[in-house]
Image: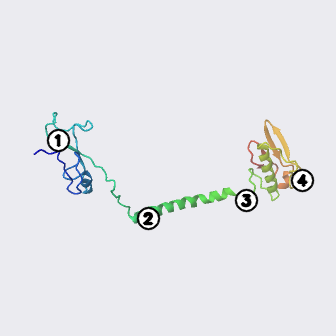
């Protein structure tokens, strides 16, 4: 008696029909679930892959082992103490960086008195004069007209403007009242100088 078609083989574990590439007597999924490495036959007719063996293909066939990870395979979780140790080290490192950068951040945010360069030691009345010089040079560098009512707070006279080769210099009219020989600011440096 003749059969109706090719004989069908089934997996011994799950009962699904076996494909030609499945490692008999199990299907590929059951084979991998048991922790085995999947062995895929190197056949001449599939994707042009040649069988390793004799030139005519009549000798014994060799199979190349290919490991394919399971899609439902659970990755082992990291040890909780190791995660805690890594998180602690990262927190401590960020705390060290923030602590090291904090003094320079707060020091540069709010100066306690107007800044200037030079060798003169100025008295308390010079702070308002230096603040006026900062405001006047900012107006000049941004192209705004200077206010005409800005005067030196110590003597009450307006500031002196001089121009030389495209550089504007604004000077205090009476720097001796501030304890200096000269107090001025230039448009190219934009920092008051007291000598």
**Residue pointed to by mark 3:** 112
Q: Nearer the viewer, mark 1 or mark 2?
A: 1
Could you tell me how far apart the alpha carbons at marks 1 and 4 are, in whole angstroms? 107 Å
Q: CA distance from mark 1 to mark 2?
A: 52 Å
> How dense is the environment of label 2, judged by Cα within 10 Å: few (below 14), some, or many (20 and up)?
few
Say whether residue 94 is visible: yes
Residue beneath disc 2: 84
> Spatial distance from mark 1 to mark 3, Cα to Cα?
87 Å
Give the percent coordinates (x, y) of residue 118: 75, 50
Q: CA distance from mark 2 to mark 4?
A: 67 Å
Q: Residue at x 17, y 47 (%)?
A: 7
Q: In what element is the residue under mark 2? A: helix
Instruction: Please name whichever residue, 82 or 66, is drawn nearer the observer in this view of the structure.
Output: 66
For the point 42% across and 62% down, which residue is it? 83
Mark 2 vs mark 3, foreground winner is: 2
Q: Which residue is mark 1?
A: 61
User: Which residue has dot 4 on it?
Assistant: 156
């Amino acid at each position: 008696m003749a059969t109706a078609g090719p004989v069908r083989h089934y997996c011994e574990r799950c009962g699904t029909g076996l494909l030609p590439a499945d490692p008999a007597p199990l299907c590929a999924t059951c084979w991998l679930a048991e922790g085995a490495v999947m062995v895929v036959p190197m056949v001449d007719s599939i994707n042009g892959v040649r069988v390793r063996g004799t030139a005519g293909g009549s000798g014994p066939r060799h199979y190349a082992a290919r490991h394919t990870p399971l899609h439902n395979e659970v990755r082992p979780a990291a040890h909780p103490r190791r995660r805690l140790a890594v998180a602690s080290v990262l927190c401590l490192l960020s705390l060290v960086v923030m602590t090291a950068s904090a003094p320079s951040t707060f020091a540069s945010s709010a100066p306690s008195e107007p800044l200037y360069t030079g060798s003169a030691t100025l008295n308390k009345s010079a702070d308002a004069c230096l603040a006026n010089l900062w405001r006047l040079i900012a107006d000049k560098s941004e192209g705004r007209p200077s206010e005409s009512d800005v005067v030196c707070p110590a003597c009450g006279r307006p500031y002196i403007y001089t121009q030389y080769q495209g550089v504007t210099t604004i000077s205090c009219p009476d720097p001796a009242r501030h304890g200096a020989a000269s107090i001025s600011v230039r448009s190219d440096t934009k920092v008051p100088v007291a000598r």
